Image (cartoon, rainbow, N blue to C red):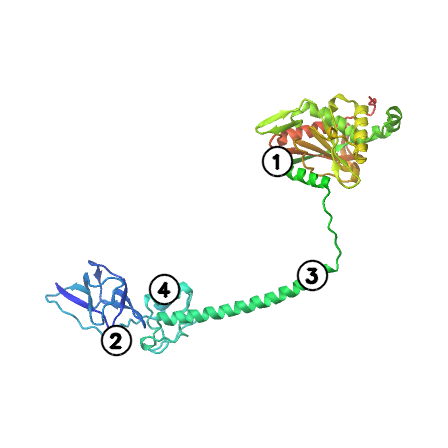
Amino acid sequence: MAEIKILLPAMGEGVTEAKITKWLVKPGDKVEADQPLVEIATDKVDSEVPSTNTGTVKTLLFGEGDSPQVGQAICILEVEGTSTETLPQPQNQVKIELPKEQIAENIATPLAEPVQEKPAGTKGYPNYLSPLVRSMAIQEGIGMDELLKLEGTGLNGRITKDDLLQYLEKKSQKIAEVEAKAKENTLIETTAATADMNTTMATFAHEVIPMDRMRKLIAEHMVRSKQTSAHVASFIEVDVTNLVNWRETNKESFQKTYGDKLTLTHLFAQATVAEIKRYPLLNSSVEGDNIILKRDINLGIATALPNGNLIVPVVKRAETLNLAGLAKHINDLAQRARDNKLKPDEVAAGTFTITNLGSFDTLTGTPIINQPQVAILAIGAVKKRPVVIETPAGDMIAIRQMCILSLSYDHRVIDGALAGQFLKSLRDRLESFDAKHQIL
């Protein structure tokens, strides 16, 4: 076996040494003639040193980062033969001719158009691209069409690392200038638009109204309820024709007998109390991981005040009262609420709340639970509508008094099934109201 020394070639006038940036082989590797062995770099050019023969790498004489002198042996190969020799190295930079197709494969973007063949060494023609330059071009997304426009400062006009860095710097500066101009134009437009908006808004008068104490308390109470309970709402439609007709027939005699007006709210309240007794979980509260079932049904009736605020006076032990008793308590509490004459204990200890949205012609809504209760019933406006009703003679369309009930409930305690059962049972009770019902 013979040994061949691979020498560091000359890289141009004034270049006396080169830095080994990366070995592409290691001792014991089989190499072919012209196979790149090492990547080198100078202040002017980046290149590869190829093998001069087919053989086996015996020794690497320098490590990565070392800077051998031009003409020094950097590697020893073992080749077929009987003597040790040093083959002459070319005096110019190693030049590897690559067809344009292979060059295109080493660049991130494809050729924009066919490149005319040019003789090797023609100024500006990238007939050789070092691994470093190729890697930089790929990373920065520079295509062959851009590289062809660059004037290389390396040997024979080849593109060096510094050429590419300088090009990227100029390109970045140009992009930055374009972006700055765009931002400047946008700022001018935005400023003008803002000025126009401010001028427009200045023509509108506005007034800041501080919340009064009660509104602050309501706001805090509602937000706390949303943060505490898992709110869910269920709805059901009710035919209250019999209820409305009975009330119209008996309201005058009721007032003469008991001295109080009879409203649909009173009838809804009586039916609700009766159903709560059947579904006691709706009359509960939550304390930690415990559900507290309340023995008494303390019925809250949401009442709108003249100043726009809302208050919920409570009818204590509503389950012990008949219709006349409920009407008397509800009317009394509502009037004293509007007159600001309620006592503190008359707005406390509620276990279930009713709110009548129909007073303002609202069809339905999803009220917020009155903490620490677990449910609140909203009564929508009663409206005449054509509906399909079932009769022994078959289905028919009739004008009926219809109403939507909505139940907001705490899903931590009440599931949809229970809420649905409660609403269905309440609907059935209201729809089956006896037109011959006696006032009690």
Mark in the foreground, 4 or 1: 1
Q: Is residue 9 above or below residue 433?
A: below
Q: Mark 4 to mark 2: distance in Å?
A: 24 Å
Nearest the camera: 189 or 250?
189
Within 10 angstroms of label 4, few (less than 14), some, or many (20 or more) residues? some
Q: Which mark is residue 245?
A: none
Which of marks 3 and 4 precedes in the sequence?
Answer: 4
Amino acid at circle 4: Ser
Q: Are marks 1 and 3 in contact (CB under 8 Å)?
A: no
Which image quarter holds the C terminus? top right
Residue 59 relative to residue 294: left or right: left
Q: Nearer the viewer, residue 226 or 120?
A: 226
Q: Which residue is mark 2?
A: 92
Using a 10 Å C-alpha cutoff, classify the residue at mark 1 as few (fewer than 14 neighbours), some (14 to 19) or many (20 or more). some
Spatial CA distance of label 1 from label 2 is 83 Å
Quick one: SS at disc 3? helix
Number of the label disc, if any, that sits on residue 135: 4
User: Residue 228, labelled with which disc?
Assistant: 1
